[in-house]
Image (tube, helix red, strand yellow):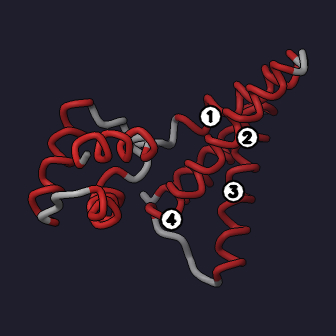
Amino acid sequence: MTLKEQIAEDMKAAMRAKDAPRLEAIRMLRAAIQRREVDERVALDDGGVLVVLEKLVRQGQESIEQFGAAGRSDLVEKEQVALAVWQAYRPAPLSAQEIEDLIQEALAHTQATSIKDMGRVVAHIKPRTQGRADMAAVSARIKERLS
């Protein structure tokens, strides 16, 4: 079952259970996926869905910070519920050792020796870590290794 099919099934289950917060979060996710498909005129595979999901999660985390700073605990709680629903669709995160192994393999494969080669290394790693690691943190580790 693809990720889009799983999301559709979960939406039906949330409707049947009359779980309004969960249903709202899933509908938001489906709308973002459909918007991307229409904009790009393609049918997204699991990788594309993960990209949309990562963007939603990042936006949700930023919203929580902003709502918290504004003292809007009701909106923080709403975003946290949505974030918990979206987190369930993400693959298991990579361990620190797995990330280090991927970086080492990418450095060897791209024969990177300086910071100028960072783009090639990141391009090599990114598809393997999609949705499973924070690319900002991975990039920082790569930069550290190449400096």
Left or right: 111, with 124 as reference point: left
State whether residue 116 is above or below residue 82: below
Please, what is the three-letter code of the amino acid marked with disc 4?
A: Gly
- The disc label shown at residue 30, or none: 3
Answer whether residue 19 is visible to the viewer in this image: no
State whether residue 108 is above or below residue 140: below
For marks 1 and 2 on the same chain, the one whose residue lies earlier in the sequence: 2
**Gap between marks 4 and 2 measured at Cα:** 18 Å
Please, what is the three-letter code of the amino acid marked with disc 2?
A: Ala
**Gap between marks 4 and 3 measured at Cα:** 12 Å
Pointer 1: what residue?
A: 85
Q: Mark 1 touching mark 2, by CB under 8 A?
A: yes
Pointer 4: what residue?
A: 48
Q: Nearer the viewer, mark 4 or mark 2?
A: 4
Q: Nearer the viewer, mark 4 or mark 3?
A: 4
Please, what is the three-letter code of the amino acid marked with disc 3?
A: Arg
Q: Residue 124 is drawn in which quadrant?
A: bottom left
Q: Nearer the viewer, mark 1 or mark 4?
A: 4
